[in-house]
């Protein structure tokens, strides 16, 4: 457990008196969460503690304030709440990195936004646009869980299943040869055979 920097009562007082002061509240919430001060109030988790308060802060808003406050601490230039929120995704992307790497990434995006803005104010919109250019695109969960080899394997499994079904169709058409008519069965049988050949080629490609 981290050494306490302030008491729980002091942090709660900050939140009560400065609900509109984004960064002060974010810092107080961060201390309560990271130093596990909520345990002093009899709670096993930060969110449960938060929900017990009449601050009007849900989990999303509280973490938004914490992130913005953390971002603000990493920059030498003061930023407002909207600017800090626009930079928060950078911090989120580097959440497993050392603090110095996080600070460097946040500073890089902000400084690039300053250059982009030129003589204009550095708005949250400019920061977001620069951030999208600088930050590498994060793969989706589907992309993360599927490598080329896995995709090929999945395709092959699908093709094998379809192959089985087509062969069953062939068997059924043969069984109904007498009642269905030779011409009709011949057409179905021919199409099924062509489909099987195509599937064989696809399976070879997917290996």
Image: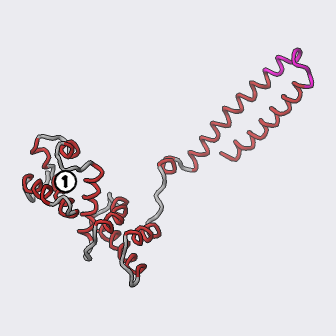
Extreme residue in the right direction: 183
Q: Nearer the viewer, residue 7 or 201?
A: 7
Location of residue 13 with respect to 122 vertically, above or below: above
Magenta region: which residues?
172-183
Q: Check if residue 76 falls in the magenta segment.
A: no
Location of residue 46 with respect to 160 vertically, above or below: below
Q: Which residue lies at the image location 40% right of the left edge and 83% below the top edge? A: 118
Q: Which residue lies at the image location 87% right of the left edge and 24% below the top edge? A: 185
The mark total stands at: 1
Location of residue 163 with respect to 149 vertically, above or below: above
Q: Nearer the viewer, residue 102 or 115?
A: 115
Residue 21 in the image, given as x and y percentages of width and height: 20, 63
Residue 38 in the image, given as x and y percentages of width and height: 14, 46
Q: Main secondary structure of the magenta part?
A: helix
Residue 201 in the image, given as x and y percentages of width and height: 75, 43
Q: Give the quarter of the figure containing the C terminus.
A: top right
Give the image quarter of residue 99.
Answer: bottom left
Instruction: State the SS at label 1.
Output: helix
Please give left or right for residue 47 compared with residue 40 in the image.
right
Residue 76 in the image, given as x and y percentages of width and height: 25, 76
Give the image quarter of residue 41.
Answer: top left
Location of residue 73 with respect to 5 vertically, above or below: below
Q: Which residue lies at the image location 26% right of the left edge and 58% below the top edge? A: 65
Extreme residue in the bottom direction: 119
Reading the image, the residue beneath label 1 is 34
Q: Check if residue 174 falls in the magenta segment.
A: yes
Please give left or right for residue 100 compared with residue 18 in the image.
right
């Amino acid at each position: 457990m981290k050494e306490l920097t302030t008491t729980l009562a002091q942090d709660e007082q900050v939140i009560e008196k400065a609900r509109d002061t984004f960064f002060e509240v974010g810092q107080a919430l961060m201390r309560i969460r990271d130093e596990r001060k909520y345990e002093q109030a009899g709670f096993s988790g930060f969110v449960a503690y938060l929900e017990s308060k009449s601050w009007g802060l849900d989990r999303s808003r509280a973490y938004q304030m914490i992130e913005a406050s953390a971002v603000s601490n990493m920059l030498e230039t003061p930023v407002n709440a909207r600017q800090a929120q626009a930079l928060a995704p950078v911090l989120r992307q580097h959440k497993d990195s050392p603090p110095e790497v996080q600070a460097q990434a946040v500073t890089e995006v902000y400084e690039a936004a300053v250059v982009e803005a030129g003589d204009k104010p550095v708005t949250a919109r400019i920061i977001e646009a620069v951030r999208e250019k600088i930050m590498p695109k994060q793969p989706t969960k589907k992309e993360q869980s599927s490598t080329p080899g896995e995709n090929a394997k999945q395709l092959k499994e699908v093709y094998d299943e379809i192959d089985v079904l087509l062969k069953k169709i062939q068997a059924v058409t043969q069984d109904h040869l007498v009642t269905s008519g030779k011409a009709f069965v011949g057409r179905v049988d021919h199409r099924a055979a062509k489909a099987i050949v195509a599937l064989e080629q696809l399976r070879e490609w997917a290996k």
